[in-house]
Image: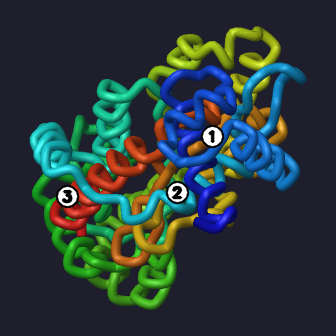
Amino acid sequence: MRSEDRQKIILNTLVTDYIDRGEAISSQSLVGKTRLDISSATMRNDLTSLEQEGFVKQLHTSSGRIPTDKGYRYFVDNIGEILQSEKELAFFEQQLSQVSTRIDKLLFFSAQVLSEISEYPVIVMTESLQRNIVKFIQLILLNVHQVLIVVLNNYGENFEEIIGLEEPNISQDALNKITEYLNNSLKDIPVDNLGEIFGNNIEEVSRIFSSYENIFNKIIIAIKKSPKALSSRNLHIEKNNQLLSFPEFQDIETLKKIHSVLEDEHKIYKMFHNKTTTREQDQIVSCIGMEHSLEELASTSLIFSPVMVHGEEIANIGMLGPTRMKYGKIMSRMNSLMCVLCKKIEHLFM
């Protein structure tokens, strides 16, 4: 066997053992674990080569070796195809069937489910939604002085606003006529185009609703606010105290640095958009140690996946933990969740 092939086996064995046990491994132990027909001296020479190339390191002169970020990267890049677990697919399908309303609630519930079966914190960040389509508008007369305006988009999100009536002379029947006109005119129109649609039809609107021009103008102003309200970015973190269970994060200063990121929406956005290590075959992204764009996360790994619907990235879901993460298991679980989640979103909201 070539020394290069032998060293690949040694490195994979070393990383797997360290992930499982969290202890440095000696050359003598590696001889037995790799089942290679080599002497301890050959093993030591191979480990020295791996150390010189930056894949492993020694914490102390007389200690065994542990993986470096580069060693973990080689390990992750060579995991191979991430298969979906039939058992986990069925589990996620059963769990997500409980949610069928807003898309953000579905995403956040997915994080909750994922955190319950994992040992890592789960982070969800929804994106500013570009494919934001009007699906339904409703006007409700609350009392003689107030009207409730409801706009529903294709993501299951509601925008609501109450407007005041200076002249309380409109009935629910009249509001229903305005509602019918708005739904006929605006259904399946991008929310960002509402202002343009109203501008192009101002003469028709004035003619049809001349008796209620002041009220109609207030309704239009309120509806135009909906793009910003329905396109905002949201952050949700499940069980960030899980980090305390890992020996790597017992140092209070290290933990403080990580939590400073988890409390900063801008930094989390930056964290999720460092996508130089995406696996093309399954869209699973991994950032290991110093690969993070944020120095505070140098002791962590993040495994995440964008939630893609009709080619648009609507969110990112990821798990954060020490660099000594169970990469294969996490990636398989993430892949299974994404398969179920994206299909459900497309079915419900698109």
Real-space Cα distance between discs 3 and 2? Answer: 18 Å
Q: Which mark is residue 127?
A: 2
Real-space Cα distance between discs 1 and 3? Answer: 28 Å
Image position of 333 with respect to 205: above or below:
above
Q: Is residue 144 visible?
A: yes
Image quadrant assignment for residue 254: top right
Q: Which residue is the site of mark 1?
A: 301
In the displayed structure, does residue 93 sit left or right of residue 166? left
x, y percentage for residue 172? 14, 51
Image position of 285 with respect to 141: above or below:
below
Q: Amino acid at mark 1?
A: Ser
Residue at (42%, 73%) from the top-left corner?
281
Q: Residues within 10 Å of mark 2 (few under 14, many from 20)?
A: some
x, y percentage for residue 138? 22, 56
Residue at (14%, 61%) from the top-left corner?
176
Image quadrant assignment for residue 207: bottom left
x, y percentage for residue 23? 63, 20
Q: Which residue is the site of mark 3?
A: 344
Q: Secondary structure at mark 1?
A: strand
